[in-house]
Image (cartoon, helix red, strand yellow):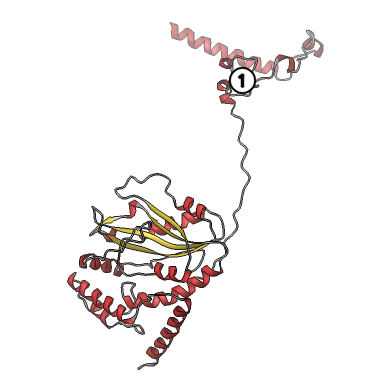
Amino acid sequence: MTKTAHGNRREDRRARRRIAKLGIADFETVDDLRRRQRDLVRRLADAGLDTYGMRRLRNCSTDRCARKSCSEACPFAAYRLRLKEIPAAYRLISRAAGPIYEVRVARGSWARPIGELAKVSLAAATQLNRRALDTLYIDIVAVGLFTVSAALDDQTPHWVPEIHAIVAGAEQEELEGAFSADRASSEEFSDILRVKKVENLAQTLSDVFRRDVQGWQHPWQTEMPRPRPKKAHRAEYYRWLLGLSRSLVVRYGCDRHFNKLSKEPRVIRPKKERPYPHHLVRHMFGGEKWQDKDPQEYDPTKPPRPPRSQRPKRVPLPDDYYSRSGSLPANDDKSWARKSAQDDRWSFCLTAGTL
């Protein structure tokens, strides 16, 4: 046994002890992982993906990976990720202030028919999670997973993508308002949302971070058992996992190591004062602006004039103003000369045109 393998086994035992201290029941055993691994290799072989890299998946174990890069499709890789994610997420959520809720969100537009799982958009779900929580403007943290389940009991079998996360720091009404759709879904499948208070944080985190293929279970019908996907469905699910270029983990308010990030406070700017709508005064009945004036005579391009009694009085000029000054203004004679020459040219043009 190499030093690396020995160190990995020792770390695996430590991680399992941490999981046991959290009180998580029904955590998968090595036998469960090997059974899922055999099913993975067989389904990929039936789908025509029996390549050298895929055959190496059967050599993976809890302390080593047989491929150059781990994939979340491998049961042992998913197992090692859960051993790291659950204690770190538990530490993050338990230290957060405020209530803790389990959130499940599914949009009808995300659903895809059986055979078109590759068209599921992980970016759309991540964007929805970020935008919804951004609207709350409070210090919250959220961790979860983007999961895909096979709805086989429905009249139209399809894949149901959803966000399964745990949010700490917000009330139930706030979360329901943030994740609720603005309008009713026009798709064939309806939108689904449930916000439930977390009773056992460790067990809920274990359920959230499961990456194995499962049948769809409605959030409001948890007492019903999950249907087991068929071989073709499991093969399609494994191929989708192998083709992913990003992680399925959904986070908010923390980094990829589940360390809390500091969020800048919301800047509330004063509202800009809007100008008075003078162009709408003619349509305002009973207003003080035009109480004694016909609205149809109002000029919308300028403010209404005050009543005549309130206008400033004009001082008339004396009759002998220019005679007492002795002459016209400085450039008045030149301007009159230019106007006379202009009038002569216009008269000539009109006469020539008439002839």
Residue 350 to residue 255: above or below: above
Determine whether, in the image, residue 134 is placed left or right of residue 41.
Answer: right
**Quarter in which the N terminus is drawn:** bottom left
Where residue 329 appears, x then y in whole percent?
A: 74, 17
Q: Residue furthest bottom?
A: 1
The residue carrying pointer 1 sits among few (fewer than 14), some (14 to 19) or many (20 or more) residues within 10 Å by Cα, namely: few
Residue 211 to residue 174: above or below: below
Q: Residue furthest front?
A: 223
**Residue at figure coordinates x 52%, y 68% from the top left:** 93
Where residue 71 appears, x then y in whole percent?
A: 33, 74
Which quadrant holds residue 164?
A: bottom left
Viewer-nearest residue: 274 or 183: 183
Under circle 1, the secondary element is loop
Q: Which residue is mark 1?
A: 286
Regarding residue 327, the answer to whether it shows in the image is: yes
**Quarter in which the C terminus is drawn:** top left
Residue 219 to residue 291: above or below: below
Please state which amino acid type lies under the numbered disc 1.
Gly
Viewer-nearest residue: 145 or 24: 24
Where residue 200 appears, x then y in whole percent?
A: 47, 68
